[in-house]
Image (cartoon, coloured by chain):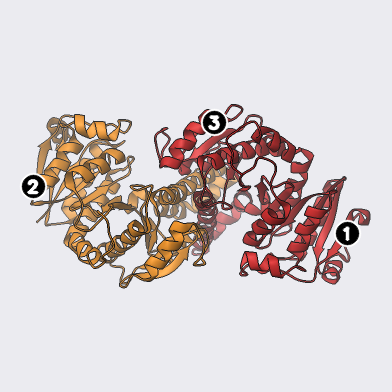
Chain colours: A red, B orange
Amino acid sequence: MIKIVVDCFGGDHSPQANIDGSLVALASLPDLYLILAGDEATIRAGLAGHSYDESRVEILHAPDVIGCDEKPTDAIRLKRESSMVKAVRLLRDDDSVSGLVSVGSTGALVAAALTRVGRLEGVIRPAFCPILPTLDGGIVGICDSGANVEVTPDHLRQFAIMASLYLQNVYGVESPRVALLNVGVEAEKGDTLRQETYRLLQQTEGLNFVGNMESRDLLSGKYDVVVCDGFSGNVLVKTTEGTALELLKKLKKDIFSRTIYKIGAALMKRLFTDFKSFMDYQNYGGSVLLGTSKVVVKGHGSSKAVAVQRCIEQAYRAEAGELGRKIETEILKYDHYEQ
Amino acid sequence: MIKIVVDCFGGDHSPQANIDGSLVALASLPDLYLILAGDEATIRAGLAGHSYDESRVEILHAPDVIGCDEKPTDAIRLKRESSMVKAVRLLRDDDSVSGLVSVGSTGALVAAALTRVGRLEGVIRPAFCPILPTLDGGIVGICDSGANVEVTPDHLRQFAIMASLYLQNVYGVESPRVALLNVGVEAEKGDTLRQETYRLLQQTEGLNFVGNMESRDLLSGKYDVVVCDGFSGNVLVKTTEGTALELLKKLKKDIFSRTIYKIGAALMKRLFTDFKSFMDYQNYGGSVLLGTSKVVVKGHGSSKAVAVQRCIEQAYRAEAGELGRKIETEILKYDHYEQ
């Protein structure tokens, strides 16, 4: 049985999306056990009317909620009865619980995970690794996407190792092609950080390092893992999502401007639905925080049920694939890490 | 008369696209005078058959070409007879020439501009400012997009001032809304560089600083200028262009997968043409290198005639709007700059 605690509050569609997504995940994974954290009465009301295996669900009562606009460190210190803090504490204290899923405040979750849950042995800095779809039908993982805005080559090498193992063990990508985000493909491109990291990645046995990647090639399908500092990784992921969403919005608006377009679009209804679904981050779950001693998955604040379900599946598969143990083994092969 | 030298070689569609674009610009601007740099016989052949005002065009013979894969510093030192180096030398030496347009190697152009043309008084580092279309029909300038991958808050403030004056004097944006690219909108977000820059921009009178911008809002139309280091600026611009192009490619492929879609798309032909044109960077010209003592505009390597034409218009309008003088005046108001 794999036990995962789900923070049921803090998102735009919480708690119902969190509850609904939890129940779908529960139905699809027979050895999944869920602990739903949040106000008990509200969660009970959300569960009412659904049919599910009650022997694999429990509620962790937490009357309080951390808002997205609260200062992370204050929030986790002061709101001890919040669903997020109680979920994190359970993850830390209960050996039988392997993972946590939250769609609440990113800052608070990172702060709570780092201070309460801690890191795997040898890991300097845990890092986020969201997944985006590529245009050849595959996926690409981006690490880090925002947990660490200031990094060193050693950090980046660890991100590469962790993300590579993640794609391998959770998504079944055999020998993930790892690229370094840079302003050009040539080895000498970029600032000192990129140049030194390039050399370090080249020297790292067991990594399938394929060189620098320009951001315009992110969705090309040529890479499985893109390594970057959290600042440019954040820009990379949010620009991709933002551009896709804005263009879709424009397309929709343009279609409604003329009747003939509306007729044409009606014939293409299925195509547009598939296209929208392809670009919808809801279908790709959340960002796993790689390097914490237990699995932590952060979903978008706007996650609907399907995104929550995917986040739970990500946490489940990370545990089933023994990702933590594998990261520790691999990271410990390299001497040069500070603590 | 505004004199601009056009490097006619070094792009994917050179020299014909450069020549054709030059002649369109010439026809639309009665006081434009063009010097076409490159192999004279080839340029003469390219001009043959076109009707244009020959009194406003001359050729600067340069038999050699700098390739995109050559090491920039070596290329400009060794290829003294290349179209780019000769164009840059003319810009430096001839007081009557105000600007240069090139679609050749970015690295070589930046190196040549910095060493041969030099900077405006007070400017620490020239920076690229490409223009992208926003979804409300406006534009947004991104500065820097790749000339400086390592920067300080003082650099970023100068980028903000220069880009703001550029949007104002070349595109007629009255009081450009300047934003700092960051991982969140709150003032305390980001690394030390971003936090310090935020404070500095707030203190800069004459700048309409509106706060941090998350990259997903680039195309929203809420901002006129986005300030960033050249690394994340490069990621921002290339991700936007890359995502738009890749999605368009996918849409096209999907349409051709079923007959009913092809019929639907036929009814929407005009919409798709407009949509494609909206996203086509060719229509938005090139990146002006802000801060050099004379105007330098870099077009995409894949520039077609229309992009070259737009680049020439950008150089022309920068000169007509006295951008250089205005940048100098404004920059010199601030004491804290190093040289």
- The picture places residue A272, in percent across and down from the top left corner, at 59, 52
- Circle 3 or circle 2, nearest the eye: 3
Residue at left offset 9%, top offset 42%: B58
Q: Is residue B148 left or right of residue B94?
A: right
Residue at left offset 67%, top offset 68%: A75
- The picture places residue B106, in percent across and down from the top left corner, at 30, 41
**Can residue B245 be seen by looking at this rendering?**
yes
Instruction: Tell me the CA gap for discs 3 and 1.
Output: 44 Å
In the image, B13 versus A97, the foreground residue is A97
What amino acid type is highlighted by mark number 1?
Glu
Q: Which residue is mark 3?
A: A209
Above or below: residue A112 compared with residue B83: below
Q: Earlier in the sequence, mark 3 or mark 1?
A: 1
CB contact under 8 Å: marks 1 and 2: no
Above or below: residue A172 compared with residue A115: above
Q: Which mark is residue B273?
A: none
**Can residue B135 be seen by looking at this rendering?**
no
Residue at left offset 83%, top offset 56%: A23
The total of numbered circles placed on residues is 3
Residue at the farthest front position:
A339
Q: Which residue is mark 2?
A: B94
In the image, B185 versus B302, the foreground residue is B185
Mark 1 secondary-structure assignment = strand
Establish whether labels 1 and 2 are both on one chain. Answer: no
Q: Which residue is mark 1?
A: A58
What amino acid type is highlighted by mark number 2?
Asp
